[in-house]
Each structure stands twice: as C-alpha cells, then as structure tokens.
Image (cartoon, rainbow, N blue to C red):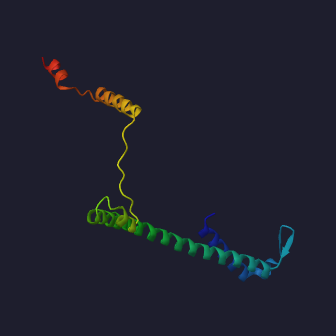
C-alpha cells in the first residue's frame, strides 16, 4: 500500500471513529482490547508520521533535484577554471596549479612489447573486418 493510500485510509478510519466510535465499542487487536481513544491515538500517530514522511520525501526529492542541477553547472565551471588556469599558469607549473587543486597532466609511459604486439593484432583484425587495403593491394584489385 502506498504512503498516500495509507494516509487516506487512516483519515477515513479516524473520521469513522469520530462519528461512530461509541457504537463500535472496544476493539480486540491481538491480545489487547483497545478503546476508542486508544484506537484514535494509534491511528493519529500513524497519520502524523505518514504526513511527515511524505513532506520529508518531497523535501529530499527537491534537494536531490537541486543538487543534480547544481552539479552539472559546477562541473562546467570546474572544467573552464581548470582550462583557464592551465593556459595562464602553464601546463607544467606544478606549484601554481596545485593551489587550484589541479594535478599536472601526465604523459603516458612507453608501450611495453606485449602492448605493441596486442596493438598490431588489433590493427590487422580491424583491417580484415573493414576490408581496408594498402595501395599495392588496391592496385592488384584494379588490374
């Protein structure tokens, strides 16, 4: 049952108890006999908690929406500030960039032999799949 359904149900039961509570008399709940006042109190506590939870959920969703909106703009601003700092301070000025919390860009190290072999395999496979040919291979096809 949704929160809205629970709230509506509690409101209806409270209204019914207010109108006809004396007619119903004590109600057996589990092992306890609860009077009209006790039933009303339990339902009212539930209703208050459900209403509060609904309000808090709406506030939470609103806060998350604002956070997402602000995060997108903040990311754009951060990229722009970083680019401006790198261009004005120089890409290798480690001390000045560190004041902005920017690490210098790292140059990748040399490729290992295994990486070169893997790259060559992938290149050959790509040429086969795309059916790309070199100039000599194309001349053979044309002739």
Residue 142 screen position, x and y as percent: 13, 20
* Quadrant of the image occupied by residue 11: bottom right
For image coordinates 39% across by 65% down, the residue present is: 98
Q: Is residue 87 above or below residue 35?
A: above
Q: Position of residue 82 (x, y in %)?
A: 33, 64
Q: Position of residue 20 (x, y in %)?
A: 74, 80
Percent position of residue 25, x then y:
82, 78
Nearest the eye: 99 or 115? 99
Direction from residue 66 to residue 130 in the image, left or right = left
In front of the other: 108 or 125? 108
Q: How many dots with numbers?
A: 0
Indicate the quadrant where residue 37 lies.
bottom right
Q: Quadrant of the C terminus?
A: top left
Question: Could you say which quadrant of the image residue 33 lies in?
Answer: bottom right
Instruction: Name the side, left or right, on which 31 lies relative to 106.
Output: right
Out of 55 and 139, give the one closest to the viewer: 139
15 left or right, relative to 86: right
Above or below, 86 against 119 in this view is below
Viewer-proximal residue among 2 and 125: 125
State the residue at coordinates (22%, 26%).
Answer: 133
């Amino acid at each position: 049952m949704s929160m809205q359904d629970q709230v509506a149900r509690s409101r209806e039961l409270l209204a019914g108890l207010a109108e006809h509570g004396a007619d119903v008399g004590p109600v057996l709940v589990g092992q306890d006999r609860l009077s009209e006042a006790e039933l009303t109190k339990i339902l009212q506590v539930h209703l208050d908690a459900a209403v509060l939870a609904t309000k808090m959920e709406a506030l939470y969703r609103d806060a998350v929406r604002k956070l997402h909106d602000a995060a997108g703009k903040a990311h754009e601003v951060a990229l722009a500030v970083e680019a401006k700092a790198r261009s004005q301070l120089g890409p290798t000025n480690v001390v000045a960039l560190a004041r902005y919390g920017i690490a210098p860009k790292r140059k990748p190290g040399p490729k290992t032999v295994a990486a070169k072999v893997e790259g060559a395999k992938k290149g050959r496979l790509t040429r086969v799949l795309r059916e790309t040919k070199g100039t000599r291979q194309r001349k053979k096809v044309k002739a």
